Amino acid sequence: MTNKVFFTLFIAGINLIYAQQQDLTKYVNPIIGTEKMGHTFPGATVPFGSVQLSPETDNVPYSINHKYNPKTYDYCSGYRYEDKTIIGFSHTHFNGVGHSDLGDFLIMPTVGQLQLNPGTIEDTKTGYRSHFSHENEQAEAGYYKVKLDDYNILAEMTATTRVGFHQYTFPKSTNSHIIFDLNSTIYNYDDKNTWTYVKVINDTLVTGYRQTRGWARNRTVYFAMTFSKPFKNYGQKNEEQNLDYKGFWRKWNENENFPLIEGKKIKMYFDFDTNQNEKIKIKFAISPVSQKNALQNLQTEIPNWNFEEVRKQAKENWNKELNRIQINASENDKVNFYTAMYHTFINPTTYMDVNGEYKGLDQEVHQANGFVNYTTFSLWDTYRALHPFFNLIQPSRNNDIVKSMLKHYDQNPIKMLPIWSHYANENWCMSGYHSVSVLADAIVKGIYTGDVNQALDACIVTSNKRDYEGIGEYIDKGYIAAENNSTSVSNTLEYAFDDWSIAQIAKKLNKMDVYDEYIKRSENWKNNYDTSIGFMRPKLANGTFKKDFDVLDTHGQGFIEGNSWNYSFFVPQNPNELIKVMGGKKKFASKLDELFNMHLPNQYFENTEDITKEGIIGGYVHGNEPAHHVAYLYNWVNQPWKTQEKIRMILEMQYKPTPDGLGGNDDTGQMSAWYIFSALGFYPVQQGSDSYAIGSPLVDKAVMNLENGKQFIIEVENQSKKNVYIQKIELNGKKYDFYNLKHQDITNGGKIKFFMGSKPNR
C-alpha cells in the first residue's frame, strides 16, 4: 500500500470516528427491490464483497426446447419475493441486473429421505426444496435468516469478503443431510456447466472448482468448504447422460465415499446424525485463481467457528461505509436512503484473493500491486451516477476501480476498456463504451492517481474499434445506419457522449488536437435529430430518415431500453445546443412538461422486461437509465422550480421501503445512486465535468464525511412534503444564486443551506 493511499485511509478513519459512528444498519432493508423488477437479493454480503450468500427460490431453465423462457428473467438475482419455496443458498449473485449469471455452489440442508433434485413448487416432497414464510425470514446488512418449514431447520448466514458462513440448526435425526448442488446456476441451461471438480480431503474439508459458459463464457470459480462437524457419509450423482466414452473409472464405485469427483452435472450430499437444536456450520470460500488460494482465503478471513463474531464484524463493516453520510430525515426516508447506500456498495465486487492474486482476461494469474482489483462493471448503467457518487464518497475505492478497468484493457486481447464485464470476462452487453466516461470523471475530479496519458490512450483505442457495433460507420458517417444496427440511434447518441468525455481528458492534458477531434465527434447526435418532427430518429445508409417510425415504441425503433421520447433528451454533453435545435428554452420546457404529463399506453411497455408500470411517470421512464438526467434539464431553461417538483415527485413515487419499492432493475446500484444524489439535492448530469445540477433535497440534514478528513454539511430549512421549492441557497454563509454546485465546493468541506417553500421561486 502506498503512503498516499495509507494516509487517505487513515484520515478517513479519523473522520468517521470524529463523526460519532451511528448504527445505520438498522435502516437497511435488503428485501427492498426483491419483488417485481428490482432484481435485488436479500442475502448476506459485506461491502464490495466477492461472496453474496443468498437464497434462491427457484431454478427456472433459461430455455425450453432451445427457445428463450421469459420466466427466467424473474430470477436474475435467484430470489423472487413472490415465491413460497427455497431451493437453497448459493454464494454469488448480481444486485439488480437485467440479465444474469452466477448462482455458484448451492447448499441446502435437509432431513429425512435423501433427494438430489430441487423438485417442484407444486410438490416440495419431490425434491430437496422447502416451503418458507416471510414471517420467519430476516434480512439485515451482512446477515440473513429463514426457517425451512419442510425440515424444521433454521438457516442463518453471514459473510466476509471472500467467505460465506452458514449456520444450520437441525432437529434430532439420524438422517440429516447437506446437499451440495454444483449443477445449479442462475440462467441455467444444459450446457452451461462445462466441468466440475471436487476433492474430498477429509471428513470436514472439501475443495474444488466449477467452470461455466454463460454470460461470462469462460468462467472458473474455485472453492474450499469446511464443516464444523465430521460427516459420516458422503456421495454424489452425476446426471450426465449418453456419454460415448467413460474410460475405466467403472472399476470404482464413484457414487459413495469416493474422494475424487469430476463431471458436468454433479450433485453431492453429506450425511450427519444431529441432536435436537444442534448447529452444523459451514465455511465456504471462493477464489478466482486456485483451490489453494480459496483455502487460504478461508483460513485468513474466518480462522474460527464463531458465527456471531463474524456477523458482528460484517455489521461493523457496513456501518463504517454507511456512516460516510449521516442524515436526518423521516424514518421511511432513512430506510430508503441507507438501503440505497447498501445497494450502491455491493458492486463492483472484489476480484482478488487475500494474497493479491487474480485471473485476468488473458486467463493468466496476475498480482494486484498497490490496488484492489474489482470486477462486475455494468457500465451502461453505472457511469451515470454510481461512479460519480464513488468519486465523492469512495474516491480511493473508485481510483482502484479505474485501475482495475485499465488492467482489463491491458489483459484484453481485443484491447478495449470494459463494456459490461465480470469474472475476467467481457460479455459486451448494452451500448456505448462508457468506461471512458468513468475514467474522465475520475481524472477531471483528480481522483485517478495513475498515468493519465496511458488512460487517454486506452480511451482512444477503445473508441476507434471500427469493427465493434458500428463504430467504423459512426466515425465515417457521423451516425450508424438503421439497416445495419437495431439500436443505431442510441448507439450514436451514447458514443457521442463518450467522445465528449474523452475530449475532457484531452483538455485536462492540454492535448488540444485530440480535444478538437473528439469534441467534433461529440456533435454526432445532431445527425439523428429530425428537425421536422423534433425527435431523434433512425437514419438509413442513404442519409434519409426511416419512414415507419413511432416515437413511443421501445421496440424496433433504433433504441435500447427506451423510446425516442426519452432518448431525444440524451445530449447531456451539450444541453444548450439541444435546447437550441429544439426551438429554444420555451419550447424545450414545454416538451419536458409533455414528457412528464403525457399518457403512455400499456402497449408500449407491457412486453418490456426491465420495468413495471410503476417505473413510468407520464412518458418518463425512470425504471431504465437513459432519462435519469432529464428532470434536471429544467435548470438549463431557467425553470429550476420544475426540476425541484419533478425530483421530489420521482423520489416519492419511485422509491418505497417495501419489497416492490423499485420500479425497475437496481442495475448494480445505479437506481440507488440516483436516489442518494437526488435526496441530497444535486446530481451529476455531465459525468466528466466538475459540476452537479441542483435539485430539491429530501433530507432535513446530511453530513458527508469525506475521505480527506473534511465534512460537507447539507442543511434544509422548512423541509416538508409540500415545501419542495427552493427559495434561497446559501453556500458557506453567503447567498448562492446558481443552480449548479462545483465538485471542489463539496470536497473543500463547508455547508450548503437550502431554504424551502411551498410555492415556486420564479
Image (cartoon, grey):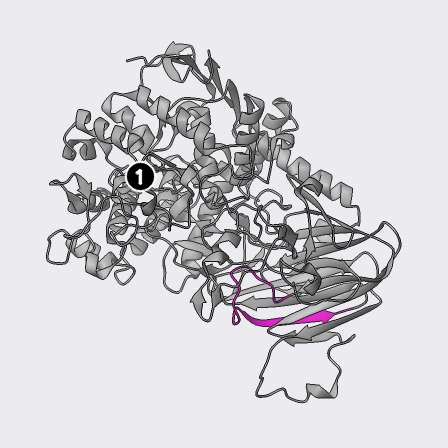
Instruction: Give the percent coordinates (x, y) of residue 415.
Output: 36, 60
Badge 1 amino acid: Leu
Main SS, magenta residues: loop
Q: Secondary structure at mark 1?
A: loop
Q: Nearer the viewer, residue 338 or 545?
A: 545
Instruction: Give the percent coordinates (x, y) of residue 631.
Output: 33, 30
Residue 554 visible to an observer of this rendering: yes
Residues in magenta? 182-201
Asked if the stretch drawn in magenta spans residue 525, the answer is: no
Q: Nearer the viewer, residue 317 or 146?
A: 146
Identify the residue shown where x is 41% and y is 36%. Answer: 446
- Which residue position holds label 1? 600
Identify the residue shown where x is 45% and y is 23%. Answer: 748
Residue 418 visible to an observer of this rendering: no
Q: Among all residues in the image, which is located at the extreme front?
A: 122
Identify the residue shown where x is 53% and y is 26%. Answer: 333
Asked if the stretch drawn in magenta spans residue 187, the answer is: yes
Identify the residue shown where x is 19% and y is 26%. Answer: 585
Q: Nearer the viewer, residue 263 or 705?
A: 263
